[in-house]
Image (spheres, rainbow, N blue to C red):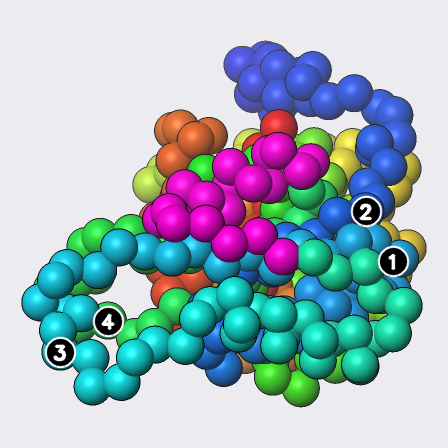
Amino acid sequence: MTRSNQSAIDSALSGYVLHGLPVFQLTTLLAATDFSQRSATAVARAAELARGHKARLVLVHAIEARPPTVQRLRLRKPVDPVVRIEAQMQKLRETYPDLDVTCHIAAAKPGDLVPQLARELGADLIVLGLHMARRVLETVRLTNLERITQNAPCPILIAHDQACRPYRTVLGAITFAPASAKALQIAATIAPEGEFHAIHALQLPLSAKLPSTDIMKSAEMTEAEMLRETFMTFKGLPKSLSLPEIVPGGVHEVLQFRIRELQPDLVVIGSHSGRDPNTLGNYARDLMRAPPTDMLVAKPD
């Protein structure tokens, strides 16, 4: 190993603090609802988690202003959202008699209302359903789900599985940074019985891809292995976490391969791009638009 390579590794390791992760607890959950089947799945998952952790659940419904032309095209008068959300809460109370559930309704855009309310209430987790399928020309704009995720102050759980079973197999796409350790810790809180797997997609320079190069002995692989060793010293990681795999390749291909292989019922990813922690990363955005299963999207500190 050259002196410059060792210096790069030492620099990467210097940002790590070898101590336990802050304890993550679920005390307040937000579940966004638009009364569709998609949001019903999110509400059901949020209710299960809230009951299991003795947390309070707040249902959130945003009333968006519609253009007059759209309102005139309605054939039936819409049902009062207050009536609908009260009926939803009553159903939850019948199913979970000991559940602490309230609601919040406001005339606002979901992408603004949900993150703002999460901050005001100190929410630990926001649970969302899948977004509606959109026309091709609309895909350049962020969906409400994406806007909420980008602006949220806490992790986002996207509920996909209508069966709402306990999570058994969890797959995390990690970077060996403390934020990845925190993401897995959060996942362990909502999937206490899950078997945890993690992968690190190792991006390689062109020089490391030459036929004559042994990738396993490259400086990039050595650095990744040292970071993994340090990563595994964090206290608070899931007890069932197996040694994370280091797989050369892009995140898209590596994660998709492992998803097909493991068939996880929960996938854990980070929300931000590598350039801006406040911007939704392209990969997170792509995966959220067609999630293969339930997804936990962790936020950077």
Circle 3 residue: 73
Mark seen at residue 134: 4
The alpha-carbon separation of the residues under discs 2 and 4 comes to: 34 Å
Residue drawn at 67 percent across, 38 percent down: 121
Q: Main secondary structure of the magenta part?
A: helix
Q: Earlier in the sequence, mark 2 or mark 4?
A: 2
Q: Earlier in the sequence, mark 3 or mark 2?
A: 2
Mark seen at residue 222: none
Label pair 2/1, CB-CB below 8 angstroms: yes
Q: Amino acid at mark 4?
A: Arg
Q: Amino acid at mark 3?
A: Leu
The alpha-carbon separation of the residues under discs 2 and 1 comes to: 7 Å
> Please, what secondary structure does the residue beneath circle 4 have?
loop
Q: Is residue 141 above or below residue 20?
A: below
Q: Amino acid at mark 1?
A: His
Residue drawn at 18 percent across, 69 percent down: 71
Q: Earlier in the sequence, mark 1 or mark 3?
A: 1
> Please, what secondary structure does the residue beneath circle 3 have?
helix
Mark seen at residue 53: 1
Foreground label between 4 and 3: 3
Foreground label between 1 and 3: 3
Q: Amino acid at mark 2?
A: Thr
Circle 2 residue: 27
